[in-house]
Image (tube, rainbow, N blue to C red):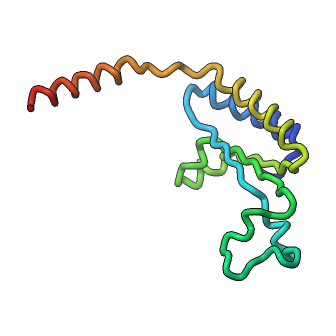
Amino acid sequence: MSGLLSSDEFFTQLATLLEKTQQKGHGSVFLTQKRLSHDTAAKSPPPGTKVADDSLWDLNPPNPLPILIRATDGDSQSKDKVKNKNKVKISTVVQPDDIEAFFARYAEVCKAGMQSLKKRDRSKRKKDKSKKKKAGDDKK
């Protein structure tokens, strides 16, 4: 499964991917986002915006750029090509005007997918640190 989806399809498949990972009892979902600038690179920059000495001239584009959002399952980290055939990759492009509404819904879907996670047991870590600290004090 891969390709560019509409926002609604992306959220549906993301919820399914999170649910599938929870049912396994283990696994990961990798969420990435980046500025989509390949469309604007084909066009020449407006006159006067590119400065020859400034290598970071593209950090302040004249118009807001769309964002590419991707989600993959944890099987993507495997080097085994047989396993990678089952890898799920979904992505969508969010236009600057739709970013606020998209991220509000994105947060809801991600929160819903994290509800069954177990809370970390930090009591063991705190005890271990205090034991190490006391052992270090005895050596002085």
Q: Position of residue 13 (x, y in %)?
A: 79, 37
109, 87: nearer the viewer? 109
Tell me the quarter of the picture where residue 109 sits: top right
Tell me the quarter of the picture where residue 43 sits: bottom right
Q: Quadrant of the C terminus?
A: top left
Q: Position of residue 30 (x, y in %)?
A: 63, 43
26 in relation to 10, above or below: above
51, 121: nearer the viewer? 51
Q: Position of residue 110 (x, y in %)?
A: 71, 30
Q: Is residue 134 left or right of residue 97?
A: left
Q: Position of residue 133 (x, y in %)?
A: 22, 27
Residue sitting at the far left = 139
Identity of the residue drawn at 80% across and 64% down = 61
Identity of the residue drawn at 15% across and 26% down = 135
Identity of the residue drawn at 54% across and 49% down = 78
Res. 47 in view: yes
Total marks in image: 0
43, 68: nearer the viewer? 43
Identity of the residue drawn at 86% across and 77% down = 44
139 in relation to 7, above or below: above
Res. 1 in view: no
Residue sitting at the far bottom = 52
29 in relation to 5, above or below: above
120, 135: nearer the viewer? 135
